Amino acid sequence: MSEPVGGLSAFGPGKIIVIGEHAAVYGEPVLAGAIAHGVTARAVPGAPGIELSANLEPAQFEALQRAYAAASKGAPLRVRVTSDLPIGVGLGSSAALSVAVARLLLQARGKKFGVPDVLKLAAVMEGEFHGTPSGVDHTTSARGELILYRKGGPTKAVKAKKPLRVVVAQAGVRTATKTTVAGLRERRTRWPKRYKRLFHEIGTLASEGAKAVTRGDLAELGDLMNVNHGLLWAMQLSSERIDAVVRRLRALGAHGAKLTGAGGDGGSVIGLFDDPTDAIERLTADGVQCFESPL
Ligand code: MEV
């Protein structure tokens, strides 16, 4: 493998939405945190452009090329992207990629930069991957911490009184976020009053969740996550596969469990535990892909 040009290399972490996905698109608060897994972008010798070690569908490959062209504006840089984050399962892989590449491009310019610069450039790329992103994914990745985010509003860092130990478990492949968000938008356009009420309730759960985190009240946070999952389910954003994993995590002793990210037919499910060691062992023994992520 070739060495990075001038040692340039940058990382973007993946994310977990603890409470508030989808409602975030409509301006409600959302509680989300960065995880240890993520995407690394390295400058390598070669013609300007971007390459990825994972296999992508043709449409995803084209979106990646468009996103890189929009952000790099012809910078003479060849970027190789590697990831230890499962792709397309609701853990913010496109945002992590956008943040890693944005950081690399800013490093290559050789000027000082900060989080606002990373956010601006990463947003250009995220816009190519998603139709109407709320911005929570790339903001969480760029800040690398637990946050209460609101589209167009100030982002607040949320300091946990007790460590949050979360199991992230896979519930199989899912359709693209863009498609799930668009389907929900149709239902919301048809029945605006009801969906406004539901989104507002989810935003309230997210704000209450941030307070429970700062108080170290894991039981309340778990209950808020369970209620959030119920509302996502009511909006047709869950599936039998997702619900089976949610039930399993609760049976294994989670304070709360829910889908995370766009949901739909598959993707990722999270469970909040005091100590997830036993749950991870048992899920792994049953062939469920999972890992622990401290937040
Ligand atoms: C995707 O990780 C989260 C969604 O709320 C979309 C968004 O906020 O852009 C489903």
Image (spheres, rainbow, N blue to C red):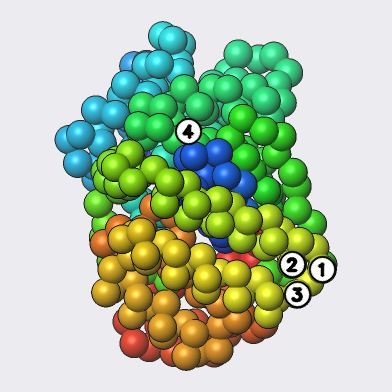
- Check the image and report above or below for 102 versus 169: above
* Depth check, front residue: 165 or 202: 202
Q: Are marks 2 and 1 in contact (CB under 8 Å)?
A: yes
Q: Earlier in the sequence, mark 1 or mark 4?
A: 4
Could you say which disc has been placed on residue 212 in the image? 2
Report how far apart the C-alphas of labels 2 and 3 lie in the structure: 5 Å
Q: Earlier in the sequence, mark 2 or mark 3?
A: 2
Q: Earlier in the sequence, mark 3 or mark 4?
A: 4
Q: How many C-alpha atoms fall within 10 Å of the one at disc 3: few (<14), some, or many (≥20)? A: some
Which amino acid, by three-letter code, is at mark 4? Ser
Mark 4 falls on what kind of element?
Answer: helix
User: In the rendered image, which quarter is residue 63 located in?
Assistant: top left
Ligand 1 has an atom within 8 Å of the beta carbon of the residue at disc 2: no
User: Disc 2 vs disc 4: which is toward the camera?
Assistant: 2
- Check the image and report above or below for 161 versus 17: below
Which amino acid, by three-letter code, is at mark 3? Asp
Which amino acid, by three-letter code, is at mark 1? Arg
Residue 165 image point, x, y percent: 64, 72
Instruction: Give the residue displayed 41% in from the left and 62% down from the top.
Output: 232
Mark 1 falls on what kind of element?
Answer: helix
Q: Earlier in the sequence, mark 2 or mark 4?
A: 4
Residue position for label 1: 215
Quarter of the image with the N terminus in it: top left
Could you say which disc has been placed on residue 98 in the image? 4
Residue 219 located left or right of residue 85: right
Residue 166 image point, x, y percent: 58, 71
Residue position for label 3: 217
Report how far apart the C-alphas of labels 3 and 1 lie in the structure: 5 Å
Report how far apart the C-alphas of labels 2 and 4 lie in the structure: 31 Å
Mark 3 falls on what kind of element?
Answer: loop
Quarter of the image with the C terminus in it: bottom right
